Image: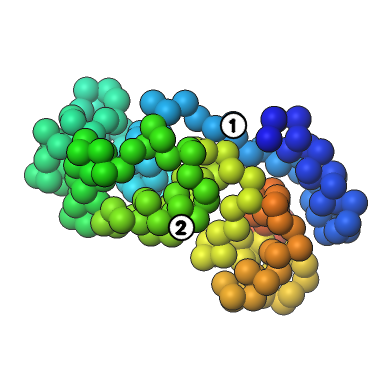
Amino acid sequence: MVRADVTAAARELADREPVIAGLLERHGPPRIPRPRPTGDRFPALARSVLYQQLAGSAAAAIHRRVVDAVGGSLAPAPLVALGFDGLRACGVSSAKAVSLLDLSVRVETGEIRLERIGRLADDEVVEHLTRVRGIGTWTAEMFLLFTLGRLDVWPVGDFGVRAGYGAAWGLGGPPTPGALTRHGDPYRPYRSLVAWYCWRAADDAKRARLPS
């Protein structure tokens, strides 16, 4: 889809769903990124691994140390050369160090071909990436959404999406992943846009709970 279609798709969803209409009015059209150039795919995926389950500031500091250690740009060969001990010295956990090295080796050998991954369907991308140790469905879905710019990603395992959906649709709490899968069906093929609004709704709910 061309970029103008994101706004058109959001308006189409808003025309048939009052909740989305309210979110569109409050937050504007979803800011779904354009697909990144092929050369940005490996750094984006490696960054996702480093940021897993860490607060933003801590993850950013570790990411910066790794980037400095490999000479300013995340790439497979420099990461392999840095090795497990080098990654650990940067503050990377053992599990993430193993994951980054497994990813780097698989890209180096051509088993994972990030330059061609954009030709695959969404479920094929997830299957391809989850071969890598430490890369699960959530990381693959974030790659689909924020690196490949896919518009029909529905990350039901993401707590922010679940919490935001529960808050925006007045469910009294986050739905289960299974329930959220069903809730998302009417919004195909634009579920990425709904996920983006769920994240905004989750932020709104957090702010509403803060003392004034």
Task: Give the percent coordinates (x, y) of residue 40.
Answer: 41, 29
Q: Quadrant of residue 111?
A: top left
Judging depth in this view, the residue of 42 and 19 nearest the camera is 42
Amino acid on which disc 1 is placed: Arg
In the rendered image, which quarter contains the C terminus?
bottom right
- Crowding at label 1, few (<14), some or many (≥20) Cα neighbours within 10 Å? some
Task: Give the percent coordinates (x, y) of residue 96.
Answer: 25, 52
Which residue shows up at 90% across the image and 51% down it? 15
Q: Which residue is mark 2?
A: 138
Q: Quadrant of residue 177?
A: bottom right
Q: Earlier in the sequence, mark 1 or mark 2?
A: 1
Q: Is residue 210 left or right of residue 125?
A: right
The residues bearing labels 1 and 2 have C-alpha atoms spaced at a distance of 20 Å
Amino acid on which disc 2 is placed: Trp
Task: Give the percent coordinates (x, y) of residue 16.
Answer: 88, 57
Which residue shows up at 28% across the image and 53% down it? 132
Res. 34 mark: 1
